Each structure stands twice: as structure tokens, then as C-alpha cells.
């Protein structure tokens, strides 16, 4: 009988303890529900109260694609709400993500749009906008690299921290950022989908802008695959005669920097011969008469 009473008392104690825990859980859930509208509830607000985000990393919007989205919105409405933050004391909201949907909603003639309201300062708004932009599937490799670089520069992140934020490997981040050092002609080719990320990565590993451009032109003219490009890079890099130690030492660092900058800007091989007296020659290479006309037009 004593043991039976002890079991009953033990059972009461456990039930009381579980009751306290359930009460605590319920109270915490009530607090979360009370706080939820501040950050996650969808609200309808006037479209005129929403302002464009000055930190928006996306600049170009395809007009035809916007019109297609506007037609869809007219039929189905906005399926995914915009994300905004409230601008204190202005009765206005600023876009964090969803500018494309916002623009299409204007075209569709909407008076109100559904939004998630987030609490964020300038730095947090920039970071959210950049990361949301990176996660879009239609970005090309250069645009991704630009966004990664902005996160590093403007959000004061290193490659390791950035990799954690966007859920990528550190090497992936570095590969995209390396593409930003490619000459403009090659970057434009990536943006316009004339060459792939694989082509660009192979070209980024080439030492010397003049050789990069030479290989790039051959890739375009012969429609080389990524594997063929990698083989060409290995072949042409091994054929390049290394500069003598004397030549390297005699060239001031600023000459090499200007040489590379001009080669990148003009998309051709540039050689600067600089002597100890500060005199020298600037030599531009061209492939044919058409290339010469291009250079003259650029310079003039």
C-alpha cells in the first residue's frame, strides 16, 4: 500500500511538472504569435507608399519579361509578397527584395501590394537585398561575382564569412570574384551568354591580359567547348616564353599596372617600354585592319 501511494504521489508530481512545462510553452507561443505580425505577417499597403531600394544590386530589368509578369499579376495577383522595411517617420516603406514584382505591379495597375515588413537598418537592408539577388536563378556569373564583391566591401565580410552567409564553399566565392579581374570584353561575353562560367574560369587562370584576350578570341571564333578551352589555355601558357629576371627587375611596378589596365581597357596587347630617364614607348598590337580601326576609334 505504501508503495502504491508513493507511485500515486510520483504520478501527481510528474503531471504537475508537465503541466508547468505545457503552461510555459503555451505562454511562449502566445508571445511569439503576438510578435509575429511585426516580421512575418503579410499586409496589404498602397503601392505608392513603397519606394525603390537605393542599395538594389539589380540594375537592368527586361521590359518584355516585366510585361509578361504584369499580365500574370493581372490574372493571378502577386503570389510571393514583397519584402520591405518601414522608413521611420515617413509613412513610407522601402523595398528590400521584390523590385521586379513591384515594377510589374505598377504595369498591371495594382493600387495595393502584399508585403512582409522587416525591421532592418541600412546595412542589414543592403545585405538582405544582395543575398536575395544572388539567390535568383537567372543571374550570370559576372553579376554573381559583383554581388559577392559588394557583400565583402560594403558589409565588411571576408570570404569565409560570406560563404557561411550564402551557403556556398569558400572556393566557390573566390572563383566568382576572380572573374571580375577579367578584361571587359570577356566579362561582357559572360553577361551576354557567349561563353560560360567554365570558359571564364579557364581564362581567369591565364597569366597576362594579352594572352587572355588572344585565347578568348580563338574560343569565340572556333566555338570551343570548356574542355577545349582548358586544353588551349594549358598549351598556350606552356608555349609562352618566361621573361628574364633582368626584364622583370627593370620594369617598375607602376608600368606593369598601367600595361595591364590599358590591355584590359583596349582589349589588346599593350607594351610599355620605360627607361630610367622616364622616357619610353607605348606599343599597341592589333590583329587586322578592322582591329586597328577599333583601336583608333577608342583612342580618339
Image (tube, grey):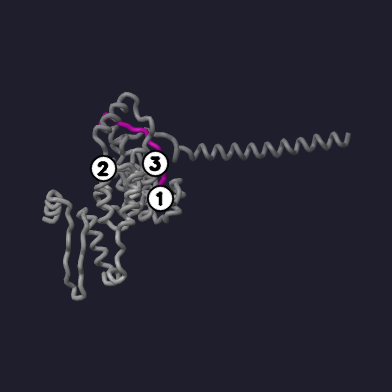
Query: What residue would you read off at disc 1?
Result: 173
Q: Residue pushed farthest bottom?
A: 277
Q: For residue 86, say whether it is visible.
A: no
Q: Height in image: 78 above or below 36?
A: above
Badge 1 or badge 3: first in the primary sequence: 3
Q: Residues within 10 Å of mark 1 (few under 14, many from 20)?
A: some
Please name the residue shown 32% across and 24% down the image. 75
Q: Residues within 10 Å of mark 3 (few under 14, many from 20)?
A: few
Q: Residue 284 versus residue 178: which sits nearer the camera? A: 284
Query: What residue would you read off at disc 2?
Result: 222
For residue 153, the mark is: none
> Is 82 within the magenta?
no
Q: Which x, y percent locates residue 216? A: 27, 48
Q: Residues within 10 Å of mark 2 (few under 14, many from 20)?
A: few
Q: Quadrant of residue 153?
A: bottom left
Q: Height in image: 36 above or below 185?
A: above
In three-dimensional space, the C-alpha distance between marks 2 and 3, rounded to whole angstroms, equals: 33 Å
Q: Mark 1 and 3 residues: CB-CB less than 8 Å, in contact?
A: no
Q: For residue 270, say whether it is visible.
A: yes
Secondary element at image label 2: helix
Q: Quadrant of residue 195?
A: top left
Q: Which x, y percent locates residue 249? A: 30, 71
Q: Which x, y percent locates residue 145? A: 34, 49
Query: What residue would you read off at disc 3?
Result: 135
Badge 1 or badge 2: first in the primary sequence: 1
**Span of residues in magenta:** 107-122
Amino acid at each position: 500500500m505504501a508503495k502504491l501511494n508513493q507511485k500515486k504521489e510520483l504520478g501527481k508530481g510528474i503531471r504537475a511538472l508537465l503541466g508547468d512545462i505545457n503552461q510555459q510553452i503555451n505562454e511562449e507561443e502566445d508571445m511569439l504569435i503576438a510578435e509575429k505580425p511585426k516580421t512575418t505577417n503579410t499586409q496589404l499597403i498602397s503601392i505608392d507608399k513603397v519606394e525603390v531600394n537605393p542599395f538594389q544590386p539589380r540594375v537592368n530589368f527586361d521590359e518584355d519579361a516585366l510585361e509578361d509578369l504584369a499580365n500574370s499579376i493581372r490574372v493571378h495577383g502577386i503570389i510571393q509578397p514583397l519584402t520591405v522595411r518601414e522608413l521611420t517617420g515617413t509613412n513610407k516603406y522601402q523595398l528590400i527584395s521584390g523590385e521586379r514584382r513591384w515594377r510589374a505591379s505598377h504595369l498591371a495597375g495594382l493600387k495595393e501590394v502584399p508585403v512582409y515588413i522587416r525591421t532592418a537598418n541600412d546595412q542589414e537592408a543592403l545585405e538582405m537585398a544582395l543575398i536575395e539577388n544572388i539567390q535568383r536563378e537567372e543571374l550570370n556569373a559576372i553579376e554573381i561575382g559583383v554581388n559577392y564583391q559588394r557583400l565583402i566591401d560594403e558589409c565588411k565580410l571576408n570570404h569565409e564569412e560570406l560563404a557561411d552567409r550564402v551557403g556556398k564553399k569558400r572556393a566557390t566565392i573566390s572563383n566568382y570574384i576572380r572573374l571580375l579581374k577579367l578584361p571587359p570584353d570577356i566579362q561582357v561575353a559572360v553577361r551576354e551568354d557567349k561563353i560560360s562560367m567554365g570558359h571564364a574560369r579557364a581564362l581567369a587562370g591565364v597569366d597576362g591580359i594579352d594572352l587572355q584576350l588572344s585565347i578568348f578570341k580563338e574560343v569565340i571564333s572556333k566555338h570551343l567547348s570548356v574542355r577545349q578551352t582548358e586544353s588551349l589555355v594549358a598549351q598556350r601558357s606552356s608555349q609562352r616564353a618566361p621573361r628574364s629576371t633582368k626584364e622583370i627587375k627593370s620594369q617598375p611596378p607602376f608600368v606593369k599596372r598601367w600595361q595591364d589596365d590599358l590591355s584590359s581597357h583596349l582589349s589588346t596587347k599593350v607594351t610599355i617600354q620605360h627607361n630610367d630617364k622616364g622616357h619610353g614607348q607605348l606599343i599597341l598590337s592589333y590583329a587586322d585592319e578592322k582591329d586597328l580601326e577599333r583601336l583608333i576609334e577608342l583612342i580618339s
